[in-house]
Amino acid sequence: MGYGLTINNDFGQMIIDSDISHYHFAGTYTSVSDVAGGTLQNHQGGTDNAGGNFPYQNLNSLGSTIGHIYMYDITQADVSTKPPMCFIKPTSTGSSAPFAGIIRMYFASGYWKVELLQSTQTTPGPTLYVFTTLDQLTLGTDSHGLRVMNEASEVTFDSQNRPLRIKGSGDITTPTLAHTGSLGSSWLGTLDVNCTPREMTHSASSIAIDKQLYYVPSIAHCALQYTHSESDSGIHNWHSYAWARNDLYWAFYRSAFRILSTTTLQCSYAIYYRGHLARTAADSSFVLSLENLLGNVDASVGSAGMVPYTNSSRNVGQDQGVIITNSDWYN
Amino acid sequence: MEMEGGWKVIKKEEVAGEYLVTVELTSVDLYQYTAEFHAELHKDLVEHTHHYTVSSDLFTFDHSPTESEIETAAIARGFNLTIDNNPSDLMLDETNNTIRKRDAIRIITPGQEDVLDYNSRTHPAEFTELFNMIPITIDSIPASISLKGDWLYIYYTSLPTQFFTEEFLLYSVRIHKDTGMVRRKGYVKEMILNKEVTDTLEGFDVITNIIGTGVFLDEPKVTIYYALEGAAANPLTPGDTPYYGVTWEEGVQIRTREYTREMNDV
């Protein structure tokens, strides 16, 4: 290399390299809005029946607790090609804290829109500590410090702009399934997250627990579906009767995280989208089918990609990289 | 729809050494019917069901499970091949065939000898013997027959156009075994008399839990059927709990009959 600067630590790991656009602190962000996760609930069919023993139970049940989605608008010069890197400062820590993870980031209306899913609602929601490359930031004006440029004279590192300092890191793996055990009974689906969280220990224990920030990609891991179909016909109390009822519950899960202790990050799930479709009829002849249940329900279900899914795990066994840093360095 | 109870694997996936098995579980009621028997049950409004459930559930194993292990796990989670709805009018015989619990109805009238009403299917010999006593030509075979004194009572569950033009729930044709005289009564499964009429019926005010009305077409009589308080009874298929019929002639109560099952006659 005939120009530039490379600094490695004692382990030979690169710390600063002028050819790399390093991430620098771009500010903290609180949510601009928040909503519950998606829910589709629909019941089609009759609610009366000559037989008199029509099953009305749990028609309005949802079978699971939906997560809460917080939305953030990140301001940045280039909003189309260089997404920011967002660290989560959770609202609480420990074994009772909610799990949170960033599930979506996209450009719209002049912002990088960030959606953060948390297993339960808190007010306020988590705070994001945002980092980006220097070409998106205003450079510092101090006359001292270290500034590094690449071959094109673009500044790639500037100590005045508080570069991202990684204190701890590791890999974390999600549990195999979000919900273990029976998915339901009769007309009531039970798809709540009930798995045991998995853990990762890291080396950032010198950071106080309430100062730790974490960055972990959240990925869609799992979809669970429970179906129940029941039909009866015959004679009861002098009446000819017939009824059928079909129920379909489903839930989509995203991996989410929480800080358990100064050395431990936990991974579990939060429910991103859930649904319960029920069809009833004074007719015993129809049987459960996805087409039956989805037919004419809501076109947005399909377009949103939230159609029910066969029980399955996704991406299990794929470690997710974790980075830990310290909020005190950026306050 | 006839279905069989059972289970089947509809998806099996191995993820990081863990086996996720989605199983479809089907439960059906205990009672199965031939088409002929089923038609008869509907014709007679006999209580019965065609009940089934189909559920999908997820089971996890730390190894590839055998069929036996899947079945054991399903049973441990509460799966049963059968649903016992226990319809009151049916039972399984010693070979697990579905049969009606009884067919002969015992008719008890104070001061008179008890009478059995014979169904053509379950008591063909008795039925034929009584049927052959009918002194007039009968166009359609009745569902059952009984003999009370000099009168043969034949019952129909569908409209016997030889005798009736109006539809009822059940039809009774009383035929004198010597003269061939015919008297008719239709049954309605609810109370159809208004208060103006019932006020003229002696002792009517103590009757509760009314289940039907007997309409005489040829005589100034009426019968009110009632069950014990809280009990539901079907005049076509009396239950273990008897029901009663009180008959008035021109407002005067002339008899009360008790209808019950012939429990020893399965």
Image: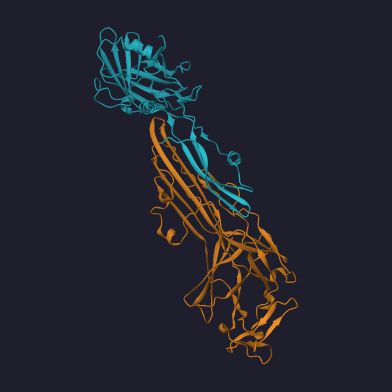
Chain colours: A orange, B cyan
Tell me how many marks there are. 0
Which is more toward the observer, B200 or B193? B193
Q: Quadrant of the C terminus of chain A?
A: bottom right
Where residue A2 sits, quadrant-wise, is bottom right
Q: Is residue B118 above or below residue B42?
A: above
Where in the figure is residue A16, as x and y percent of width and height?
67, 82
Can residue A4 be spotted in the picture? Answer: yes
Q: Residue furthest bottom?
A: A143
Q: Is residue B165 above or below residue A175?
A: above
Q: Is residue B138 above or below residue B47?
A: above
Which is more toward the observer, A40 or B61? B61
Where in the figure is residue A293, as x and y percent of width and height?
42, 50
Q: Quadrant of the N terminus of chain A?
A: bottom right
Where residue A280 sits, quadrant-wise, is top left
Q: Residue furthest top?
A: B178
Can residue B228 be spotted in the picture? Answer: no
Where in the figure is residue A263, as x and y percent of width and height?
73, 66
Side of B38 where A266 appears, left or right: right
Side of B110 where B55 appears, left or right: right
Residue at 52% over, 34% down: B82
Residue at 35% over, 8% down: B149
Where in the figure is residue B160, as x and y percent of width and height?
27, 22
